[in-house]
Amino acid sequence: ETGVTQSPTHLIKTRGQQVTLRCSSQSGHNTVSWYQQALGQGPQFIFQYYREEENGRGNFPPRFSGLQFPNYSSELNVNALELDDSALYLCASSLTGERETQYFGPGTRLLVL
Amino acid sequence: AQTVTQSQPEMSVQEAETVTLSCTYDTSESDYYLFWYKQPPSRQMILVIRQEAYKQQNATENRFSVNFQKAAKSFSLKISDSQLGDAAMYFCAYALTNAGKSTFGDGTTLTVKP
């Protein structure tokens, strides 16, 4: 059984640029959620994707957007990067019927300069 | 809105001893789960233990157990026979049943002394 994977592991961007982060869900998991974790804090929910549609969103502006593909993998896109977007971005996958129980990937560390 | 509070930013324990990490939460819902996650410096968030709110019995997973006090909205984690590998940041989290959104506390950094 393959766990949740994310790419890239690290990324450096400059303010105003756009970034795409990728996530492959655990085998059989059809729900993907994205979180932002600032240094020294707990993860904050960005949004969730189920059946290729956004299915719940946290308190993040529209420049944070996502996609889910038929194979359940997902992308997180952030436009017009700001310095405060520097964080660890975590992807988590879960099963229908047990979406509360999430399995996390190793994260992508984004640094915005 | 649901909130999760971890009042101990840092804790330390001697190897082989027992430590308890505290967590309180606030919700008006009745159907939910509580979780403890471990995040080592390698940063991968690992599920340690989960508790369904409807279950009276406290969850246990090997050396890890919880004390779930639903009326008090308290959910503490006990680690017995602490090992060096237990050193990590521990997060308490809340999620509504079958919802893919978890609310996390700010974490407790656990140090294990040899």
Image: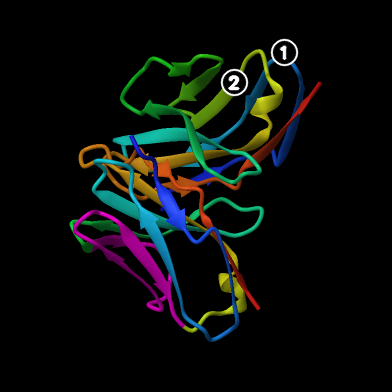
- Residue at horizontal 29%, vertical 60%? A56
Task: Give the crowd class for mark 2: few <14, some 14-19, many >=20 residues within 10 Å.
Answer: some
Relative to B80, does residue B44 appear above or below in the rendering? below
CA distance separating discs 1 and 2: 13 Å
Q: Dot 2 corresponds to which residue?
A: B78
Tell me the element at label 1: loop
Characterize the local packing of mark 1: few (<14), some (14-19) or many (20 or more) Cα atoms within 10 angstroms.
Answer: some
Give the residue pinned by disc 1: B16
Which quarter shows the N terminus of chain A? top left
Q: Which residue type carries mark 1?
A: Ala
What is the magenta range?
Answer: A54-79
**Which badge, 1 or 2, comes first in the chain's sequence?**
1
- In the figure, is residue B112 to the left or right of B60? right
Number of callouts in the render? 2
Residue A108 belongs to magenta span: no
Residue B29: x %, y % from top left: 32, 41
Task: Identify residue type, mark 2.
Answer: Lys
- Name the foreground residue: B100 vs B33: B100
Q: Residue furthest right?
A: B114
Q: In the rendered view, would you say A69 is above or below B37?
A: below
Q: Is residue A59 visible?
A: no
Q: Chain of mark 2?
A: B
Q: Quick check: marks 1 and 2 in contact, CB under 8 Å? A: no
Residue B12: image location, x then y, percent: 76, 29
Compared to residue B108, the image places residue A10 above or below, namely: below
Looking at the image, can residue A10 be seen?
Answer: yes
Point out the image quarter for the C terminus of chain A.
bottom right
- Identify the image quadrant of residue B44: top right
Residue B5: x and y in percent read 57, 43
* A85 relative position to A52: left or right: right
Apparent side of residue B105 relative to residue B112 in the rendered image (left or right):
left
Is residue A58 rendered magenta in the image?
A: yes
